[in-house]
């Protein structure tokens, strides 16, 4: 379902949604590939390279006075899980972002458009029934645990992103550049690169996804496990439903000159804008809460104090057993 930006969405968020902790103002941004990090790194100040076991590269800098670690994990869920876990255990973030490219699941999205993930769904967590029917099951830690169908975006971060996206699209239009779309909806994570229009239409019909990529669900699961606010911001790199002159293949690198569109630029601008809003927010002190996996929070700070609702943490969408 596409949640298109409106004028109301572009207003600055209210004070009660502001981010936490003047002492812990550290943000983690996860990218799979170096090409996905170019425009983000260019917008960071005071950059230095800080090695991180389990990651390909970590660049530390600042945006709006907030310390930012830009981590390159490698492609796929395993690499993303390793690097995100290592980074969070090394330092406690007030926000975790998954940024990078994706393939469109709807015809309206074009190369360079941006999707803000209101939720992230694992598309490969299925049961292939004896009849041949595919049933989506979600993931769970044990057979006794409820199935998790998706991870929801932190509501404050998503509100910030909508406000910034409205500004980015207006600025692009005023500057005479190609008009881009920034939409909010479901992002799917999968190890399958779908090029078949029929397969894309089917998965979109089943999961209501706007796009697919390979890391966001892993980053989201780690972030939610450790109680860190999460948001995925994805740019569209190709659309098999509405082909463009250049269609990216699995063997391609993300060339900057693709159809004259600087892939990742708009998503980077939105991400930077969200971090700047976090930096400008008046800090408050929030109590520590238990995290999704039942681990001690260790004094973590959350953007959403009501972390737990019933048996399920906010941001986790349970399914049936």
Image (cartoon, rainbow, N blue to C red):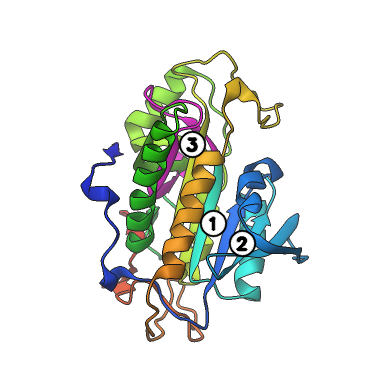
Q: How many marks can you see?
A: 3
The residue at which mark 2 appears reads as 84
Residue 219 bears which disc, if any? 1
Question: Could you say whether the residue bearing mark 3 is in a helix, strand or loop?
Answer: strand
Q: Is 7 placed left or right of 39 in the picture?
A: left
As measured in the structure, the alpha-carbon distance from the residue carrying label 2 to the one carrying label 3 is 20 Å
The answer to whether the residue labelled 2 contacts the one labelled 3, judged by CB atoms less than 8 Å apart, is no
Q: Who is closer to the viewer here, 274 or 230?
A: 274
Residue 175 bears which disc, if any? none
Q: Who is closer to the viewer here, 112 or 81?
A: 112
Residue 212 bears which disc, if any? 3
Magenta residues span 101-129
As measured in the structure, the alpha-carbon distance from the residue carrying label 2 to the one carrying label 1 is 6 Å
As measured in the structure, the alpha-carbon distance from the residue carrying label 3 to the one carrying label 1 is 14 Å
Sequence-wise first label, 2 or 1 = 2
Query: Does residue 65 lie above or below 23 as drawn?
Result: above
Sequence-wise first label, 2 or 3 = 2
Sequence-wise first label, 3 or 1 = 3
Q: Position of residue 289 (x, y in %)?
A: 39, 82
| Residue at image point 44% right, 16% down | 242
Q: Position of residue 115 (x, y in %)?
A: 42, 40
Quick check: is 228 in the magenta stretch?
A: no
Quadrant that contains the N terminus: top left
Q: Position of residue 248 (x, y in %)?
A: 62, 23
- For label 3, the crowd category at 10 Å Cα-Cα, with few meaning under 14, some 14 to 19 and many 20 or more, is many
In the image, farthest residue toward the top: 245
Quick check: is 121 in the magenta stretch?
A: yes
Quadrant that contains the C terminus: bottom left
Q: Is 315 placed left or right of 70 in the picture?
A: left
| Residue at image point 47% right, 28% down | 177
Q: Who is closer to the viewer here, 20 or 289?
A: 20
């Amino acid at each position: 379902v596409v949640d298109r930006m409106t004028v109301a969405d572009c207003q600055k968020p209210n004070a009660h949604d502001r981010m936490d902790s003047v002492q812990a103002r550290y943000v983690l941004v996860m990218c799979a590939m170096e090409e996905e990090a170019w425009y983000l790194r260019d917008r960071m100040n005071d950059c230095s390279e800080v090695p991180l076991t389990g990651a390909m590269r970590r660049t530390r800098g600042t945006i709006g006075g907030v310390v930012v670690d830009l981590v390159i994990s490698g492609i796929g869920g395993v690499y993303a899980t390793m690097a995100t876990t290592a980074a969070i255990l090394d330092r406690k973030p007030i926000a975790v972002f998954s940024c990078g490219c994706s393939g469109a699941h709807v015809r309206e999205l074009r190369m360079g458009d941006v999707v803000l993930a209101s939720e992230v769904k694992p598309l490969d967590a299925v049961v292939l029934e004896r009849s041949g029917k595919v049933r989506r099951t979600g993931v769970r830690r044990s057979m006794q645990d409820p199935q998790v169908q998706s991870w929801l975006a932190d509501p404050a971060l998503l509100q910030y992103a909508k406000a910034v996206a409205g500004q980015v699209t207006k600025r692009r239009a005023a500057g005479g550049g190609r008009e881009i779309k920034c939409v909010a909806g479901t992002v799917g994570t999968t190890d399958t690169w779908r090029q078949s229009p029929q397969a894309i239409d089917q998965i979109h019909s089943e999961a209501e996804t706007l796009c697919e990529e390979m890391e966001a669900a892993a980053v989201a699961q780690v972030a939610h496990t450790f109680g860190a606010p999460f948001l995925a911001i994805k740019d569209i790199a190709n659309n098999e439903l509405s082909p463009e002159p250049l269609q990216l293949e699995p063997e391609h690198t993300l060339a900057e000159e693709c159809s004259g569109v600087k892939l990742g630029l708009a998503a980077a601008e939105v991400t930077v804008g969200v971090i700047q809003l976090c930096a400008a927010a008046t800090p408050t002190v929030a109590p520590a809460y238990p995290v999704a996996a039942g681990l001690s929070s260790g004094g973590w700070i959350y953007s959403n104090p009501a972390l737990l609702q019933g048996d399920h943490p906010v941001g986790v969408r349970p399914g049936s057993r």
